Amino acid sequence: MLRGKITPALCINLDEYEIKLEQLNILTQKMSSIDWTIDSAIQFCRDQGMQVEDCILPKFATLQSLYDDLNTFKYKDMEDIISICKQQIETLRREKYDSYNDPYKNHINNILLEKNKQLDAFVAILVDTKRSDNYLRSIVSQLLQLLKGLASNVDDLFEHFKYGNKHYVIFGKNGAGKTTLLRQISETIFQNAIVLPADRIAMQSSSNYVGIYTNYTLNEMLKDKISLMYLTREINKRTLDSYDTGTNKNNVLRTRLYEIFSSLGLDRDIIADKESLFLKGDQIAQYSMNDASDGEKNIAYLIMATLLAPDDSFIFIDEPERHLNGALMRNLFDKLEAERPDLRFVYLTHNIDFVESRKNVALIYLEKSKAYKKWKFKKIEDYSDISLDVILGIEGTKKDIIFCEGTRSSIDCKVLECLFPEYDIQPVNSCEQVKLNTKGINGKEPLFRRKAFGLIDNDYMQEKEINSLRDDHVFAIGYNEWENFIIRSEILENINKTHLNKDLSKVKSEVIEHIKKHGKNAILSDFITKRYTKMLYATKLSYSSKLEEQIDAINSKNKTDIIAEVQELSDKIDLLTDYDQLVSIVPAKMLLKMVAQGIGLASDDDYVDLLVKHLKQDGGFNTLVKVLLNINFS
């Protein structure tokens, strides 16, 4: 839904705007050097061309609170703000204004118009010949307004929105000030920034409602507890205005509301009267929107807010997933973004499903500084090399990160959380994800301000591969899998000693015998799968007339190499009689349960739970396991 658009031109003359800023700067510098008293105030007014008459002089004696305000005014803050405004002018001169997208052009124009308007009001005081005591009062009043109006505390955020047609996701840890940020955006001079709060109460009437039309702004409508009533009124008003101007019926807002709602597959349609909404289906009797589900109310609210947003606006939506399931959520926001391609949608959420459902988005991390109402923003535009859930998760801590394979319930994650509490342990799906995330975070260290390390299973890797990964801060444990590592002799002896103190020589003999009789084929099969996969993964082909020859040559080499490596491992298994050497190369998932039951535990889970318990309670044992792991992340 795009009405006739006019590309916004730069709204003010930058040279004139800069002259006014300099006038303000000169005057405030002069005022900051004055010790304000009756005599200095009179002299200041005369220097400004005021005619201070004798009959007015006694009035100056009653202005002590005004002198106090002038002495304590934050002149340095004003000086800093003027400097920032001048830098913005230089940026606008240096960069081509036409290269900005239209929403950002509107944003810049709104900022400039408001600041220029306040500067005009201030400059007008300087040439006014009103009474000098009132002149001083006006100076103080205008300076306070300028101190607030010239500052743009959230301008850094809008800086990220300059170019292109992307949408955005803002996320940040708890306490970053998300709610305060949105409140400031909705209440300040950003006329083309619409805010849909997380605690939106979508109702259309209340018991104490008084039927008087209030001339609310759109942001005020969206925050009101009877927001649906105000939005419905505005939809109807603009629909009537469209009819008056001869707009095609298919393009009026009420028709667009009906069509978008009906297209969502809810098996019911929406109907609007003068200020109320109703729902009705083929087999469903009409009912008031007040009796609808939270999801239905939220959908109507989101559609109307999007339709009513000014052209080329930013629309901030806090917790967009609220009261919506996955498929409906994706469908709704796909349609809203398509309906208003002129808008920049800015979503504030930690919901990974929602973020992954959005196309063409950039991530912006929100970090509140120690100063009130001050924020820092970091744009994460390319996250192809880092898992999205990792990005949304790691900013909740200032610790360096260790990535491992699996989930929170995996053995490696449980053990690492005990061994390295000074790190943030982040489990990810696979070995490849560990590598990608580790390299991705370290490649953007100025952005994330922390280091990442990876820890993966050995999986029959060769020494060359292990050394190469170490250069990227990814480490392989000395055992084939974590299940091998936690049943090595030193760990097993400690667990056994603190439990039933069984005869470990018997347990170990049974493990060795099992490996020799039943485990060799399993070991070799596991080895073939993992090694041959790595060979294929490392294969590089190029398209040419000799492609078939390349493939044949690679297959021949891989065949020779894998057969040789398998034979070498087979001979090694035949020769080995040591428990730890055999355990280090076995796919130990098949051994952990045997070892656990051998020392009197019911299951492998009981063994892991006992291990974790002693790692938490016994500092000496914790240190021993860390030494056995033999990885220095620092």
Image (cartoon, grey):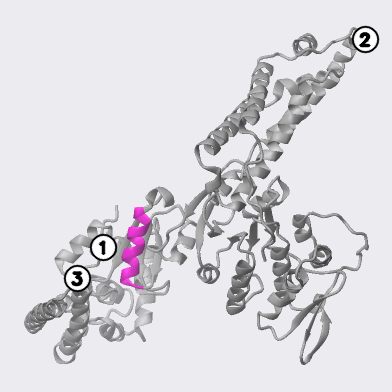
Q: Answer whether residue 397 is magenta in the image.
A: no
Question: What residue is at 75 percent from the left and 14 percent from the top?
Answer: 48
Q: Amino acid at mark 1?
A: Phe
The Cα atoms of the two marked residues, 1 and 3, are separated by 25 Å
Horizontally, residue 623 falls left or right of residue 373, namely left
In the rendered structure, which segment of residues is drawn in magenta? Answer: 430-443
In the rendered image of this protein, does residue 497 appear above or below residue 370?
below
The image's mark for residue 55 is: 2
Furthest-top residue in this view: 54
Question: What residue is at 15 percent from the left and 69 percent from the top?
Answer: 462
Q: 203 or 414: which is nearer to us?
A: 203
The image's mark for residue 475 is: 1
Q: Answer whether residue 433 is magenta in the image.
A: yes
Q: Quarter of the image holding residue 593?
A: bottom left
The image's mark for residue 540 is: 3
Give percent across and percent down for residue 344: 60, 58
Q: Mark 3, mark 2: which one is toward the viewer? A: 3
Horizontally, residue 388 falls left or right of residue 84, namely left
Chain-order first, disc 3 or disc 2:
2
* CB under 8 Å between discs 2 and 1: no
Chain-order first, disc 2 or disc 1:
2
Q: Main secondary structure of the magenta part?
A: helix
